[in-house]
Amino acid sequence: MAARGLVILGAVVLCSLVAVFHGAEGIMFSDLQKTLLVSASPRPGQVLEAGADKITVTWSLNQTYQSGSTDSSYKTVELKLCYAPISQKDRPWRKTVNDNLAKDKTCQHGIVSQPYTPSNSTFSWTISRDVPTATYFIRAYAYNSQSKEVAYGQTTDAGKTTDLFEIRGISGRHVSLDVASAVFSAFSVVSLFGFFYLEKRKAKRATQEK
Amino acid sequence: MDGVTMDREQGRFALPVDSEHKATVFPIFSVAKPHMRAFHLSWLQFFSCFVSSFAAAPLLPIIRDNLNLTATSIGDAGIAAVSGAVFARLAMGAACDLVGPRVASAWITLLTAPAVYCSSIADSAMSFLLVRFFTGFSLATFVSTQFWMTSMFSPPIVGRANGLASGWGDLGGGATQLIMPLVYDLIIRFGVTNFTAWRMAFFIPAILQTMTTYAVMIFGQDTPDGNFRGLQKSGRKHRDKFSKVFFHGIRNHRAWLTALCYGYSFGVVLTMNNVISQFFYDRFDLKLYNAGVIAASFGLTNIFARPGGGVLSDILGRRFGMRGRLWGWWIFQTLGGVLCIFLGRAGSLGASVAMMLLLSIFVQASCGLTFGVVPFVSRRAMGVISGITGGGGNIGAVLIQVIFFKGSKFSTEVGITYMGIMVIVCTLPIALIYFPQWGGMIRGPKPNYTEEDYYLSEWSEEEQQQGFHETSMKFAENSRSERSRKIDSISSPTEIATATHV
């Protein structure tokens, strides 16, 4: 009886250990080869408006990186908008986690996803309205057929200091919301005094009727 | 009171009542006037204030991007949300003693509703902090619920009345984690951008807060005998002086002890309402809605957790008197601290959720156990005592968030562990609470010291001569239930008095 319990316990422990170690095998950023060349239309320090301005991104394979068939495994390319270090400061929800790409939060906004071709590709993107105010750069990831990252390229340098641009997000406010807030607020204050006045009158009438 | 008068009084009320006309039973699903109606109005109003005060928490992942917030400014706003109520609760306590719970609560909720409406026009870290600060003032309605329940329900069941009203009100902190993402999702489906959708969502808690307050004013009644204003004008209720009430409240050292200890049960509840959603969202990579569901379950255990604490307090009071109530409070709150430590150290999602649920039960039950003791600290300044204790709860939340959850100093899980240690330490002062007529955790009662001696010490000779102390006398008699069985043999002065009346 006790032996059977121990065997089951051992199996459970073993399985969870396997799961833990298997899960910990995330892809590291340093595993990726920087074989893609990416450039984008915003000039360094330019400020763009979300929902209005366009960004044109161009990418291709860097022919001079390494000779040989480095790109045979590349199936899709995805371009993403990524936070520059200044916009990650004191914001742990945008943290760069280089030893496990699955947990990396640097690039949270997708621009486009296309099948891979080694030649020049372009895409023109209107910045969507849910992109927040921040400083950005653009990165491209190449994925293999198992949807795992194998290569990348980005518009900025390794230290993420050059060629950064800003996007100004929408405020989300509307005149109708402003008006509604003011009206409802005024109404609740007025109704308070209304109740107060009614209470006084009720109490006065009660003592008069006595 | 002789038998004939009691029957005549009994006929006026739907429920059986004691000599102060407070109900002696608690039929939870009834809406009988005025007792049960007061209960339902009270907890609904408090619930809506909780929904408003923590409405921002589950939507933070959207708000933090829209307003370009940092972890520090989010922490500051969370602290502001609970610090506003510190003085508001104190003021509310005094206001209840003077103008009654209906009017006092209406003032605070209708004056803070604009802050909730204006949350939708916040556009910076500072404006966000300000709206959370002013919205948080509405948490002072806690004091009015406790005052109102203590006015409506008799001492042997005051624990459960207080526990249910505040527990079901606290549910708002959990419900909001579900309501706000749901409302947000609904608005998004209509094609509204995320940065506008969260703003529109805030109208729901604001309108709820306004409607429940209207219900309180229209359908509620301050005391079993009527509203404060009417009773004061007709002379049936002595209109006490603010200075006297305040003086007797702050002079009672027990109020400060309960305030300190409540800071580490309710303080934990408020802190968790603020940090738990982001904790699950960021640590386990959950979707916004799922993090909200898990975070909501923390507050949702309050359907039975805090009321359970109140009921347990009443049961311990019946069997062991006030000493039982104190011991029960200390044990549960200490266990709450231990569970915080376990939660901080749990590694997997499953273990974290389990620890969080256990923690929510023990910590919220401790809140209920606290307010099984507070109604007995003072009769004359009951509102002020509730206000001081309630304020202490918020101060605890401010301290906890400032020390452990501000900026990026500690990760959230480490902060929770340290919070648990502080809870265990700051729960020890319960052992210092001593009632001479009933005893404390360590020492027994003073011999021959009665409930009348305790409660009448709040009234001077001249005041007693003018008969202002009558309600305190009745309360003293009704609170004899707080004696532990062993000292039942001490005869009370009124037993001798009624013997001569006949």
Image: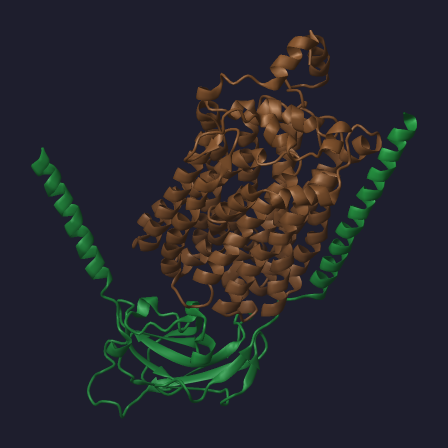
Residue B105 in sight here = no
Q: How is the image coloured?
A: by chain
What residue is shown at x 58% (from left), y 34% (from top)?
B375
At x 32% / y 80%, what residue is drawn? A152
Callout count = 0
Q: Position of residue B209 (x, y in %)?
A: 66, 46
Image spot of residue A6 (x, y percent): 11, 41
Q: In the image, is residue B426 above or below residue B478? A: below
In the image, farthest residue toward the top: B502
- Residue under the point 51% across and 77% down: A134
Side of A128 where B426 appears, left or right: left
Question: Who is closer to the viewer here, B196 or A204?
Answer: A204
**Among the 4 quarters of the image, the one containing residue B361:** top left
Considering depth in this image, is A184 or B301 the residue closer to the camera? B301
Answer left or right for B71 relative to B40.
left
Chain coloured green: A
Q: In which quadrant will I find the N terminus of chain B?
A: top right
**Residue furthest to the right:** A208
Q: Quadrant of the C terminus of chain B?
A: top right
In the rendered image of the structure, the colour used to display chain B is brown
- Where is residue B135? Give x, y as percent: 63, 55
Compare residues B361 and A65 and report the one nearer the observer: B361
**Residue A52 is at least partly visible in this image:** yes
| Residue most extreme to the bottom | A64
